[in-house]
């Protein structure tokens, strides 16, 4: 059995990626299972989705604590202490990272010991779909890694997308992009023989839970609030940048920023708090003098 | 100390007044409303110093009561039947906050069809919520149980909310002599609540009821509630002992009536137990070694006490004034589960009676004792049976005729 985990952010398409892969495996005649797991249902929040593919009936359910393959659709998650996308990856497993880095750079940057494949899926999405939606593309990459057929991938993309979009042209673009990603990962790049990936079963010991007084065991938090410490700006795809030559300091961007991330400097010019700006680009839409532009964020 | 003729509802109100409760959010429902009307009058007259707020629903009422409790106030509220169900999700929420709210439920059968008279499907629907449950037979017991409930709920080994239950009409509107203790003596028994874990202090903010993602932390919190509820068994005994010392009335987790030497035992709860006791007297006159066990503490379920009281008996008939549709009596299942591993377990019979306040006649009790005796002789026990008389069946026929179902 192959167990895959997709890690992305709400809106990127991790869930759809897991469905595309599950459907493609199903069409290829395998037993398959796919499911999402998410907490806060909002754009930008970490999302995990999983797919199991097997020649035998699948006798597992729920989270995959020890995946064979991890697809990281947003590389900023690699530094998120709550997500830890690579955690539990089996000895000899594979990590595919959506990044502009080379595999060697990514391995070093994120201190990963497993085999790392990289592909700038975001760039492919922008080039071929015109937007940073990665669902079918990540599904295509995963289909190649586990060795599914190109034909089933194509049918799976059509089947899954026709349930959620009606734009025929966009659907065709997705098929093309998924196939492009499928072929971008040549089998020669995959050093690991998937079937040789072993299991690393850890022993669990059942304990008797000790009683603790309600001062401890009520679901209350006495510690001081720490929300401001959590920077929310690291998952931007584009960063807004100013051209102060044409900026009239009208402050419309300051008023329109939904997250209060536009501040004003000593000369009364607006600037972005990049630690928390999520890159929604509403400021660009709202600027009456077109003094804002966007630059793709590339983590380097 | 004085004795007065009081209804069950007035006794409940007296319990709340003597407990010197800080905050009372309310919503009316028959047959409970008299409790909150009495409290409102006392507060209006200035003889009681509490904040009384009328809410828009039982859901809001329970939310307000639990939240007030989480700020460290001593809170009280009351409801019944449909009202309890309307606030139901908040029962779980408030219990999860681990706050010592005391609530009175005046039992009334659940729709449909609608009724105003008592059975225990309302309060037993709340049995898995985390609220402890004390069920009362007399008006005196209602007053006393509210005082005991605050002591028990506020104990740091417990810190769970409590429902004190009484039957609608049969207690709620029934007057009988009740001893009302002096407030000074109550204060000695029930001192001011001093919250240690959930309180409001501007300089010390806390987030109540944090969200958890994942079953490990969720399981921890839920099982801690279960262990706190289990702790309440021992704490309850301490509270009872002290209550008896101070007020001279004894309440254990259950009350045994001619139980010790009995061979044939009825198990009942709440006000109908009085009818069961009379039936035990009748049976004894006929030479049957009868007895009765009235379960008082329903949550936590006093497994060890029940085992000790029942094992070795020849037969036990559980009279459930409730029905779990598709299974039978709720308390029958619970008692069966705690006897299963006992070597000398009695024959266990199951009867449904008193639904919607239906009377249980002496003949019906006699029927039960006969079934127990025959069961012991033959070793065979029938499945759950509804107590229903031929006369009632005929009356039902007349009603069906009126409804055009002749």
Image: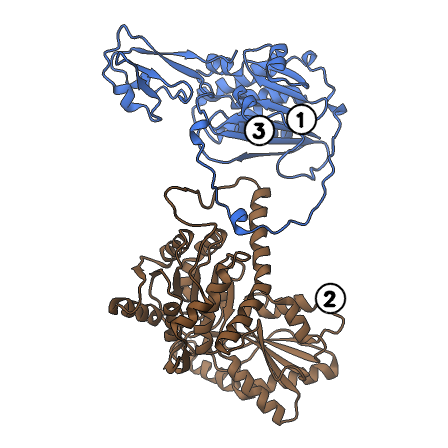
Q: Which mark is residue A251?
A: none
Q: Secondary structure at mark 2?
A: loop
**Residue A113 placement, left or right of A71:** right
Crowding at dot 3, Cα within 10 Å, few <14 / some 14-19 / many 20+, comes out as: many
> Where does label 1 land, which residue?
A89
Q: Are marks 3 and 1 on the same chain?
A: yes
Check the picture and name the quadrant holding the C terminus of chain B. Answer: bottom left
Residue B365 image offset from top left, x and y in percent: 57, 85
Colour in which chain A is drawn = blue
Q: Which mark is residue B341?
A: 2
Crowding at dot 2, Cα within 10 Å, few <14 / some 14-19 / many 20+, comes out as: few
Q: Which mark is in front, 3 or 1?
A: 1
Q: Are marks 3 and 2 on the same chain?
A: no
Colour in which chain B is drawn = brown
Mark 3 / mark 1, whichever is N-terminal: 3
> Where does label 3 land, which residue?
A18
Q: Secondary structure at mark 3?
A: helix
Question: Across the whole image, how many numbered discs are drawn on residues?
Answer: 3
**Between B154 and B116, the one nearer to me in the picture:** B154
Check the picture and name the quadrant holding the N terminus of chain B. Answer: bottom left
Residue B87 image offset from top left, x and y in percent: 41, 57
Residue B253 image offset from top left, x and y in percent: 57, 71
**Residue A105 placement, left or right of B185:** right
Q: Residue at x 67, y 66 (%)?
A: B338
Asked if residue A124 shows in the view, the reply is yes
Asked if residue A30 shows in the view, the reply is no
Residue B83 image offset from top left, x and y in percent: 39, 63
């Amino acid at each position: 059995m192959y167990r895959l985990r997709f890690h992305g952010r709400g809106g990127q398409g991790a869930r759809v990626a897991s469905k595309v892969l599950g459907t493609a495996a199903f069409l290829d005649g395998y037993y398959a299972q796919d499911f999402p797991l998410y907490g806060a249902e909002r754009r930008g929040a970490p999302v995990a989705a999983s797919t199991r593919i097997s020649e035998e009936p699948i006798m597992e359910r729920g989270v995959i604590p020890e995946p064979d393959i991890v697809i990281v659709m947003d590389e900023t998650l690699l530094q998120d202490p709550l997500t830890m996308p690579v955690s539990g990856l089996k000895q000899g497993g594979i990590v595919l990272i959506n990044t502009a880095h080379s595999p060697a750079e990514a391995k070093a940057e994120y201190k990963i010991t497993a085999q790392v494949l990289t592909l700038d899926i975001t760039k492919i999405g922008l080039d071929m779909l015109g937007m940073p939606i990665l669902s079918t593309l990540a599904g295509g990459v995963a289909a190649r890694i586990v060795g599914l057929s190109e034909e089933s991938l194509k049918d799976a993309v059509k089947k899954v997308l026709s349930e959620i979009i009606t734009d025929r042209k966009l659907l065709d673009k997705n098929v093309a992009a998924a196939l492009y990603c499928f072929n971008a990962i040549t089998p020669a790049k995959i050093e690991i023989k998937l079937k040789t990936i072993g299991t690393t079963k850890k022993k669990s010991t059942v304990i008797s839970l000790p009683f603790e007084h309600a001062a401890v065991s009520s679901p209350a938090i006495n510690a001081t609030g720490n929300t401001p410490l959590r920077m929310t700006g690291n998952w931007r795809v584009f960063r807004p940048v100013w051209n102060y030559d044409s900026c009239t300091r009208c402050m419309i961007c300051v008023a329109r920023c939904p997250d209060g991330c536009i501040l004003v400097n000593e000369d009364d010019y607006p600037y972005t708090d990049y630690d928390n700006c999520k890159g929604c680009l509403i400021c660009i839409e709202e600027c009456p003098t077109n003094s804002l532009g966007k630059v793709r964020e590339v983590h380097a | 100390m004085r004795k007065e003729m009081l209804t069950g509802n007035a006794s409940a109100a007296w319990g709340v007044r003597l407990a010197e409760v800080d905050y009372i959010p309310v919503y009316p429902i028959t047959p409970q409303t008299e409790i909150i009307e009495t409290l409102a009058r006392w507060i209006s007259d200035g003889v009681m110093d509490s904040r009384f707020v009328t809410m828009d629903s039982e859901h809001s009422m329970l939310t307000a009561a639990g939240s007030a409790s989480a700020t460290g106030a001593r809170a009280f509220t009351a409801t019944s039947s449909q009202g309890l169900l309307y606030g139901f999700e908040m029962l779980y929420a408030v219990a999860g906050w681990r706050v010592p709210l005391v609530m009175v439920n005046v039992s009334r059968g659940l729709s449909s069809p609608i009724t105003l008279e008592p059975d225990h499907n309302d309060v037993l629907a709340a049995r898995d919520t985390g609220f402890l449950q004390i069920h009362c037979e007399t008006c005196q017991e209602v007053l006393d149980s509210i005082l005991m409930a605050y002591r028990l709920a506020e104990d740091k080994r417990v810190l769970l909310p409590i429902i004190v239950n009484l039957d609608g009409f049969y207690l709620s509107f029934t007057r009988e002599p009740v001893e009302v203790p002096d407030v000074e003596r109550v204060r000695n028994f029930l001192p001011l609540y001093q919250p240690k874990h959930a309180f409001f202090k501007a300089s010390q903010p806390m987030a109540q009821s944090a969200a958890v993602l994942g079953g490990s932390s969720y399981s921890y919190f839920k099982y801690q509630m279960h262990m706190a509820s289990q702790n309440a068994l021992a704490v309850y005994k301490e509270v009872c002992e002290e209550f008896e010392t101070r007020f001279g009335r004894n309440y254990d987790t259950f009350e045994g009536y001619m139980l010790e030497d009995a061979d044939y035992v009825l198990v009942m709860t709440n006000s109908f137990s009085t009818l069961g006791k009379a039936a035990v007297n009748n049976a004894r006159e006929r030479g049957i070694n009868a007895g009765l066990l009235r379960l008082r503490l329903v949550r936590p379920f006093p497994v060890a006490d029940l085992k000790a009281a029942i094992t070795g008996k020849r037969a036990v008939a559980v009279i459930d004034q409730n029905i779990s549709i598709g299974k039978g009596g709720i308390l029958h299942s619970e008692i069966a589960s705690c006897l299963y591993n006992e070597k000398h377990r009695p024959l266990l019979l199951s009867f449904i009676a008193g639904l919607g306040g239906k009377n249980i006649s002496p003949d019906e009790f006699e029927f039960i004792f006969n079934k127990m005796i025959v069961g012991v002789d033959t070793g065979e026990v029938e499945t759950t049976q509804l107590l229903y008389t031929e006369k009632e069946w005929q009356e039902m026929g007349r009603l069906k005729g009126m409804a055009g179902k002749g």
